[in-house]
Amino acid sequence: MQASAKTELPPPPGVIGALVTGLDAISARLWVILPPLVLDLFLWVGPHLSIRRLTVGLFDQMLLMNEARGYSLQEIAGLQEVLANFNVRFNVFALLRTFPIGISSLLSGRGPLLSPLGTQNVIEVTSGLSLLSWFVALTFLGWALGGLYFRWVAEAAGSHAATLAVGRAVTQTLFFSILLSIFGLIISVPFFLLVVVLQLINPALPQILFLIIALMAVWIVVPIFFAPHGIFVRRQNALASMLASLRMARFTLPLSSTFVLAVLVLSQGLNFLWRVPAEDSWLLLVGLTGHAFITTVLLAASFIYYRDMNIWLQAATDHLKPGATAPQM
């Protein structure tokens, strides 16, 4: 006989299930954590590409400008300490850590100066043209390596990435990253001008604007977080992957935002633990390994969640079509 009722739609994939499946997948393939571990080891014991010579004069001018504006000596001293610390610690090689497609790194924002092997070999960038060349080269290299890393993790997570050619993974990653950078530039320039105008009208207005943006962040973060996943899970091109992420966020925002929040809390919360050892202690190697493992697990879980959620969305769409009935008995 044929039932007239529609088939019962299964519940959407859960956050915990995706995290557990990602943990199992990476635990069975521990070599997948090598890219973030190798990158952090390079930033830790490798050469330090410094911009100190280029920025000393610029920072001095900034301090003089703030002094002329009537800032207190205490405020100027605090700013001087921040600028001096940045000037010494910033490593241009940290640009290898790209977003949103890139190899995760614990030390890209820390800029260690010491290691158990002693002080790093410092290479000075001597001109603005040289800095621009390094910036472009390292950014594109970071995107390419990030695409390979994402493909590797997606394959380990059991998605369709095994059939995604290496060349296509790299080219679509570069196209996606360039496209997202252009979108970001188009949005950021008017936003910066708006902040300047609001600052001239009333210094409190930019804070209100930032508060509004913070409240809207949940509608922005989820589409960006899953924007590249279609390239590696569904073998889409970069633009189609972005549109698919917007569609997924539109229909699954509450649950998907919970997943993204869980990933951010776990990764950033555990980073405090991984950074506890001193930079000249071999114990930091434990932190680098833990960071590489956890971030790779979370990335694998995101591919699993994205795949299962899109399967569920397709099932939900078919379920809602007129005439959908239960299977014959």
Image (cartoon, rainbow, N blue to C red):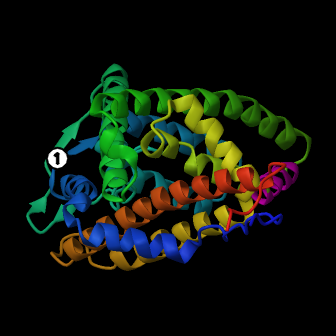
Residue farthest to the right, as pictured: 201
Q: Secondary structure at mark 1?
A: loop
The N terminus appears in which quarter of the rendering?
Answer: bottom right
Question: Please, what is the dominant secondary structure of the magenta stretch?
Answer: helix
Residue at position x 38%, y 26% from top? 171
Residue at position x 66%, y 55% from top? 315
The C terminus appears in which quarter of the rendering?
Answer: bottom right
Closest to the observer, 323 or 234: 323
Image spot of residue 263 (x, y percent): 52, 67
Residue 210 counted in the magenta span: yes
Q: Quadrant of residue 244?
A: top right
Residue at position x 48%, y 42% from top? 234
**Residue 140 visible in image:** yes
Image spot of residue 75 (x, y percent): 61, 60
Q: Is residue 64 left or right of residue 318?
A: left
Q: Quadrant of residue 187?
A: top right
- The magenta segment is 204-215
Closest to the observer, 218 or 110: 218
Closest to the observer, 117 or 158: 158
- Is 87 rendered above or below residue 14? above
Residue 308 counted in the magenta span: no
Disc 1 residue type (three-letter) = Pro
Image spot of residue 129 (x, y percent): 35, 19
**Residue 221 visible in image:** no
Circle 1 is placed at which residue position?
Answer: 47
Q: Is residue 12 left or right of residue 162?
A: right
- Is 301 rendered above or below residue 178? below
Image spot of residue 154 (x, y percent): 37, 52
